[in-house]
Image: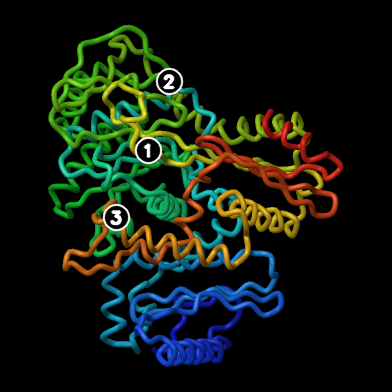
Amino acid sequence: HSPHPSFRETRYGDENDLAQTCALVQVLLATTASLDDDDDENNEKEEIKFIRAGDMKIAFLTIGDSAMTLLAVSYTGDETEAFLHMQLEYVYAQILFTLTDQVQNILETNPNFDLRDLLGATDTVMEGILDEISSIPTFITSGVETTCPIPIEIRENVSRILHAAGNQIPNIVYAIVTVGRKLVTMVQPKKNEHQIRGMDLHLILNFVDRQPGLLTSGDSWLPLCLPHLHPSSFVYAYTSCLNIDSGLTLVLVSTQSTSEQFLMFRTAGLIIKSSLGLEDDEDRKTISDDDRKVIERFQETIGLSGFSGGSGGSSNGSSREGNKLRFLVGGGNANDYSRRGNNYQTSDLSSSQTPVTAKNPLVEAVIKAPSELCNKLDEYCKFASVFHFLFRRDIPIHSGNGSSSSSSCSRKLSHCINSTFQIPLENDAGSQRRVMNVYQRLALRLRYGSCKVEATMNAFDQFHANEANSVAYDEYHYDNGHSTTATNYFPAQGIFKEAPKIHGVTYMTDGYEMFMALNGKNFELYAVLPSMISPPNATSLCAR
């Protein structure tokens, strides 16, 4: 089809320089298609996935009946084909995030249509997700970074407030508190098929992080598409800055776009902000008497008279029929919630909370978290003699029924901790990229025993076979009964997200450095150590 770059302006160089490249890509695709038609007696369409020529690697992602083709080119020869493909998958997911998969119908109807006219000024968001993938190792394990360390009682209080507010608001899908691209906590529906996937959460966090106006523009209400939830329709996100100094931002997601829903979310935002003790003088001036009464009734319902870092005695709580949200608390548990009948309620909070002081404990914890985490991780690095490490742990999303058993934790979300680079990698961008590339290969080794392209292709085939056969993916089918699903286009993200099935250890040496990876139940660890350390000792240090 007509070659148009996806970006309004290319990231490197002039757009006109890509004209010949786009034409060459068309020739490659057409030639591959013609060879496939001649050789395939069953007329099963095969698509070109990768090309390798020396150190140059090219990955392709073709959407639909060649309506749109995305490609990534690497000249270093170090990135794995799977990781190149995953970058394309996130680009496509970001396009869906803005336009839904109806863009495919537009391109099939009018191949000459310039997609950039619909994408508008989304270059910053698109480049943001690519910058994160190429520079943040957490994408290798499909994990999400959280704001930590935050005292568990503070994080749980935030979760309780979100949970209680969410259960009193109709049509809410997710309630999220974030600081830029780092998650503080979130609540979501109990139903497994409606729970958020890692890719969708990354898209939301990237959007919040790449919109600096969110911190100063007050409330916003905008449509967005979450590909794993439903690729063909929009949900609607309400965003509000809770605190400018710390960057705390509230995101509420609904399936409804009505003005009434926006007003309910706006009221919910005021309730949550006030309950967290984050009201400022401007808020107190603008909150109406009716809103103030609603806020006070909510706080009385959950026994909260202001936010503090801890909880003491008990108070009688009540619950209302709502969306029965699950909650996720980094490092927390589900035992603070009780179930009565079909309703959920938050656990008892102190009716004699510590008065809100000028220094809000949540804001203080969030502001201090980066430096505290950096210091703690530096201690770990020195203790284990490592230059860098990446740790992933799968955190269960509890159902809120007061049980922490596996039956109440049907889905898990991967949290990642990524240390700073120590000397001699500290100021060497090339070495840091090399660490990222080696981690990719180690991740594939843990999962499939090999990082070669043949193993990746086999993994892709197995992924598509599982997609076709598993009833667990029926919720992603289009409303018109079409068998193609959005997740079919995310095989690399799927294989990196899939935890290794057996516990294992693998390592590679390169010059003066040894790269070690090991995994166990619900965790993975990647580390860079001096090559003078023997593999058994390196394994022992990583285990410690």
User: Residue drawn 38% across and 53% down?
Assistant: 200
Q: Nearer the viewer, residue 330 or 270?
A: 330
- Which amino acid type is marked by label 3? Tyr
Which residue is under mark 1? 242
User: Residue drawn 29% across and 39% down?
Assistant: 188
Which quarter of the figure is the N terminus placed in? bottom left
Q: Secondary structure at mark 3?
A: helix
Which residue is under mark 3? 473
User: Residue drawn 35% across and 25% down?
Assistant: 405
- Which amino acid type is marked by label 1? Leu
Which residue is under mark 2? 153
Disc 2 packing (10 Å; few <14; some 14–19; many ≥20): some
Q: Which mark is residue 495?
A: none
What x and y, as percent, mark residue 321? 13, 30
C-alpha distance separating marks 2 and 1: 19 Å
Q: Is residue 208 left or right of residue 287?
A: right
C-alpha distance separating marks 3 and 2: 36 Å
C-alpha distance separating marks 1 and 3: 36 Å
> Where 57 sits versus 244, above or below?
below
Q: Is residue 366 left or right of residue 529?
A: left
What x and y, as percent, mark residue 511? 84, 54
Q: Nearer the viewer, residue 477 or 350?
A: 477
- Which of marks 3 and 1 precedes in the sequence? 1
Q: Is residue 270 left or right of residue 68?
A: left
Report if the CB atoms under discs 1 and 3 are less than 8 Å apart: no
- Which amino acid type is marked by label 2? Glu
